[in-house]
Amino acid sequence: MNGKMIDMKIGKNWKVLLCLIVTSMTFCACEKDLGDSPFELPISGHRKLIVGNEGSFGTNTASVSVIDLDDNSVYNNVYQNKNGEPLGDVLQSISKIKNQFYFVVNNSHKIIATDTSFKKIAELTDLISPRYIAQVSESRAYVSSIYQSKIYVVDLNTHSKVAEIKMQHPWTEQLFFHSDSVGDFVYVCEKDTAVNYITKIDVSTSAVVDKINIAGYSPSQVSQSSTGKLWVLGGNYFNKRGTLTEINPSTLAIERSFSFPNRYTTGQLKIGPNDDMYVTVVDYNTNEHGVYKFEKNATSLPSNLFLKGESNANYYGVDVDPTTADVYVSDTKGFTQAGSVNQYSNNGELLKSYTVGIGPSSFYFAE
């Protein structure tokens, strides 16, 4: 083989390799391997997606990952690297209140408050299996619990529990604060198979004042559209279909509702900037995972899933970028290894995939 032919062959192979590299970079983000190097954070001013990784139950492997949305870098174990200690066991949810992040660590029975650089400020204890936290006033927040028939009231200044609100059932899930001309209220999901309502609490008295019917049972997620309507996701248990219910908080009337196929158990609900709604579902008999997308003015259940997981996918969490309307879906990969977060366009096209911690489940978009 002469020199010219060898040069041509090398040139051709190099072009193929370059093409593969470019293609790979399109879909795979760069992960920051911190190792023994100094702790890093995404560049100040960049938009970020904070990912809460539950970890594997009972192993103290919960963690926080940060995806830099401007350069697509991934920073894993940010809390542990910043503070020199593990986050705990099962990171259930993330909230931002008064310029502080609150990480609700369910099986460690605590909530950790940090500043925006993830430096630990305080640890709220004396809580049993907390799930979600919602600010209800300048100095107060409510916290739900999986095993207690109560809502905890915490002081945001002292980071301590100051009161409890008695509930009817021993599993409270997501809660939502809503203020109107009448007063300030919190709507609570009591996740019980006999419950076909959400519970309304008056913040001024910390008393239950109403129960608002939904179309199904076992409410778990509640959110609000840009028009002020409440959307409640109900579960699928004991042959009771999973449901999605729209409620007018002014009249407390049901304005729309959708029922999911019997085979699906519902997971998470998120509303996008265009008021499109996304719901994760799973068929535990076949291990089929997917995401439904409801258009803003939908009148019936979509005929097909918006996203359908591959045979080995475990779709778990979902959220929508408030700026781009891109959809982010977490894949836990069975909670036995590093999970992934897949970024899709609003039309369902896979844009990128990011490797994060074990059991990614919750998200928070931040500047």
Image: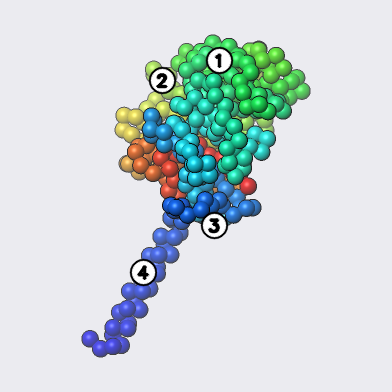
Sequence-wise, which precedes: disc 4 or disc 2? 4
Of the pair 116 and 296, the residue shown nearer to us: 116
* Residue mark closest to the camera, 4 vs 3: 3
- Using residue 66 as the reference point, say whether residue 228 is left or right of it: right
Q: Which residue is mark 2?
A: 237
Q: Position of residue 74 (x, y in %)?
A: 49, 51
* Residue mark closest to the camera, 4 vs 2: 4
Sequence-wise, which precedes: disc 4 or disc 1? 4
Q: CA distance from mark 2 to mark 1?
A: 23 Å
Local crowd size for mark 1, using a 10 Å CA cut-off: few (<14), some (14–19), many (≥20): many
Q: Position of residue 30 (x, y in %)?
A: 46, 56
Sequence-wise, which precedes: disc 1 or disc 3? 3
Decide: is 117 above or below 172.
Answer: below
Q: Amino acid at mark 2?
A: Tyr
Q: Amino acid at mark 4?
A: Leu
Task: Give the number of marks.
Answer: 4
Q: Position of residue 126 (x, y in %)?
A: 54, 20
Q: Which residue is mark 3?
A: 71
Q: Which residue is mark 4?
A: 17
Local crowd size for mark 3, using a 10 Å CA cut-off: few (<14), some (14–19), many (≥20): some
Sequence-wise, which precedes: disc 2 or disc 1? 1
Determine whether the residue tagged by mark 4 lies in a helix, strand or loop: helix
Local crowd size for mark 4, using a 10 Å CA cut-off: few (<14), some (14–19), many (≥20): few
Q: Amino acid at mark 1?
A: Lys
Q: Which residue is mark 1?
A: 150
> Image point 53% across, 41% down: which residue?
83
* Residue mark closest to the camera, 3 vs 2: 3
Q: CA distance from mark 4 to mark 3?
A: 23 Å
| Tag 4–tag 3 contact (CB < 8 Å) | no
